[in-house]
Image: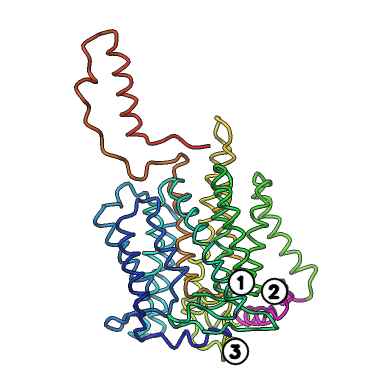
């Protein structure tokens, strides 16, 4: 990708700015101190403010600032025993299968210590990133906590992007890994802020949109925050001047709009698959994936390139299906730039790893669908606010799936994907439909005056104390 040059120059060497180190130390302290509802906020702050070029090399292992911060989460798990009450579900299994096959097969294929270290780092990011979300997201108040955090962060980030768009000067260049002067293509300024590439910046915030929209069904103050976050997100996307983020944002809008047809979600999926099959076999002269070549939303897009590499990948199935393939440029010179996450999974781990990756996506959608079906079957009636939140979890996964066809993830995009995937995992594990108490207060000492000897007044006091115990045991009721 153009504009990514220079970022790769920082691999394998320590690059640490004093401000970045100070920021990570502060964020690590917050990881250990914040209540569970906002425990993931430091991770989002790091992902949206610290360039990935900031890193420390320890015994050959490459630790970015996000990887260092993940260590603080690991420490918190043990200090607070927050694994207690953790419920395993099938998406957790799929994630571990994906990580295991991807690490083992690629290491076997290359037979190199360097690749083994690389796969350990890749597995480290997925396991800690995903399971950090799974541990901290136990109730909808936890999910709404990161939605609020996202909306709040989006406002100052949008201001920084607006400044970059107006001046062509990237304030984050001081950290290294991003250019001082913003790239211009086809006469448009492509802002990137602290992100490794303008496309990563735009798709990052496109994937954030459905998360912020969860606040819409809350009180008026949070609805205002959702509007501010949405406006900021679209401003950032526009500032990147890239087709892929814009298409991801459109996917988010379309997915959210289809909420009114949620009762027919199965029919929609079947209809989409049937339409693609009909187009491929009975309508189009070219394969159905040739439609990618026609994508050019803002001009200067590389839809043709994305079609060529995907078509080449499928035509050389026999070369990569077993353990992947090392030099796809042997097939076509366009294969030097793999802008498709599905292809990356296949080239690095063969058909088995790609299948596990697709299984992760299917079970993420399946968790949402099963929970929606359970709500529809409840005799007590439907909860539109809860359905809206669940639907948006599915929209988040949908946005990532659509983005996978135009981008192979790197940089900050990876940690966002793992974190948002954990929301679907939390849904499958029985994410509480009611608002839970994140940090219950200890029981207060009951004063002797609370127990009176007057029989006429003993019952009310005892009833009041019983109600207090029930509140401590069950948490707050759901907000509407």
> In terms of secondary structure, where does tag 3 sit?
loop
> What residue is rendered at 55% in x and 48% in y?
215
> In terms of secondary structure, where does tag 2 sit?
helix
Q: Residue furthest left?
A: 448
Q: Which residue is mark 1?
A: 405
Is 472 placed above or below 338 here? Answer: above
Q: Is residue 151 magenta?
A: no
Dominant SS type (magenta): helix
> What residue is rendered at 54% in x and 55% in y?
211
Is 445 placed above or below 49 here? Answer: above
Q: What is the spatial separation of the Cα atoms under label 3 and label 2, in whole angstroms?
A: 20 Å
Q: Quadrant of the N terminus?
A: bottom right
Q: How is the image coloured?
A: rainbow
Residue 470: percent from left, percent from top: 34, 29
Is 410 placed above or below 252 here? Answer: below
Label 3 or label 2, whichever lies nearer to me, is: 2
Q: Are marks 1 and 2 in contact (CB under 8 Å)?
A: yes
Q: Which residues are magenta?
A: 286-314
Q: Are marks 3 and 2 in contact (CB under 8 Å)?
A: no
- Badge 2: residue crowd in 10 Å (few <14, some 14–19, many ≥20): some
> In terms of secondary structure, where does tag 1 sit?
loop
Q: What is the spatial separation of the Cα atoms under label 1 and label 2, in whole angstroms?
A: 9 Å
Reading the chain from its start, which is encountered first: label 3 or label 1?
3
- The one nearer the camera, 358 or 335, is 335
> Taking 250 as reference, is 404 left or right?
left
Q: Which residue is mark 3?
A: 331
Q: Which residue is mark 2?
A: 292
Residue 246: percent from left, percent from top: 65, 68
Reading the chain from its start, which is encountered first: label 1 or label 2?
2
Q: What is the spatial separation of the Cα atoms under label 3 and label 1, in whole angstroms?
A: 20 Å
Residue 4: percent from left, percent from top: 53, 84
């Amino acid at each position: 990708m153009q504009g990514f040059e220079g970022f790769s120059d920082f691999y394998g060497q320590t690059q640490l700015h004093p401000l970045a180190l100070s920021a990570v130390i502060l964020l690590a302290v917050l990881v250990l101190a914040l209540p569970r509802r906002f425990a993931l906020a430091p991770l989002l702050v790091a992902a949206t403010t610290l360039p990935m070029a900031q890193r420390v090399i320890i015994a050959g292992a490459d630790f970015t600032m996000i990887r260092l911060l993940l260590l603080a989460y690991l420490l918190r798990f043990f200090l607070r025993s927050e694994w207690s009450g953790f419920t395993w579900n099938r998406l957790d299994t799929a994630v571990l299968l994906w990580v295991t096959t991807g690490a083992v097969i690629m290491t076997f294929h290359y037979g190199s210590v360097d690749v083994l270290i690389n796969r350990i780092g890749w597995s480290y990011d997925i396991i800690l990133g995903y399971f950090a979300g799974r541990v901290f997201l136990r109730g909808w108040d936890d999910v709404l906590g990161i939605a609020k955090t996202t909306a709040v962060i989006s406002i100052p980030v949008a201001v920084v992007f607006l400044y970059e768009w107006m001046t062509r000067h990237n304030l984050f260049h001081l950290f290294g890994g991003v250019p001082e002067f913003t790239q211009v293509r086809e006469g448009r300024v492509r802002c990137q802020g602290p992100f490794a590439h303008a496309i990563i910046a735009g798709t990052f915030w496109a994937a954030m949109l459905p998360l912020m929209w969860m606040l819409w069904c809350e009180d008026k103050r949070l609805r205002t925050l959702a509007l501010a976050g949405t406006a900021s997100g679209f401003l950032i996307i526009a500032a990147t001047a890239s087709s892929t983020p814009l298409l991801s944002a459109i996917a988010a809008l379309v997915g959210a709009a289809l909420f009114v047809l949620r009762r027919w979600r199965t029919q929609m999926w079947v209809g989409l698959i049937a339409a693609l099959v009909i187009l491929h076999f009975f309508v189009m002269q070219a394969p159905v994936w040739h439609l990618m070549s026609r994508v050019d939303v803002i001009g200067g897009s590389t839809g043709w390139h994305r079609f060529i590499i995907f078509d080449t990948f499928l035509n050389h199935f026999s070369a990569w299906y077993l353990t992947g393939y090392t030099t796809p440029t042997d097939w076509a010179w366009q294969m030097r730039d793999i802008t498709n996450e599905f292809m990356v999974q296949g080239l690095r781990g063969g058909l088995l790893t790609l299948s596990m990756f697709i299984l992760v996506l299917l079970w993420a959608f399946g968790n949402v669908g099963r929970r929606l079906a359970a709500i529809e079957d409840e005799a007590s009636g439907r909860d539109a606010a809860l359905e809206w939140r669940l639907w948006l979890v599915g929209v988040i996964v949908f946005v990532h799936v659509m983005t996978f066809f135009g981008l192979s993830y790197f940089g900050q995009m990876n940690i966002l994907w793992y974190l948002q995937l954990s929301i679907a995992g939390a849904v499958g594990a029985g994410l509480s439909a009611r608002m839970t108490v994140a940090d219950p207060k200890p029981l207060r000492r009951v004063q002797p005056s609370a127990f009176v000897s007057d029989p006429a007044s003993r019952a009310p006091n005892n009833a009041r104390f019983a109600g207090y115990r029930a509140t401590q045991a069950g948490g707050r009721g759901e907000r509407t």
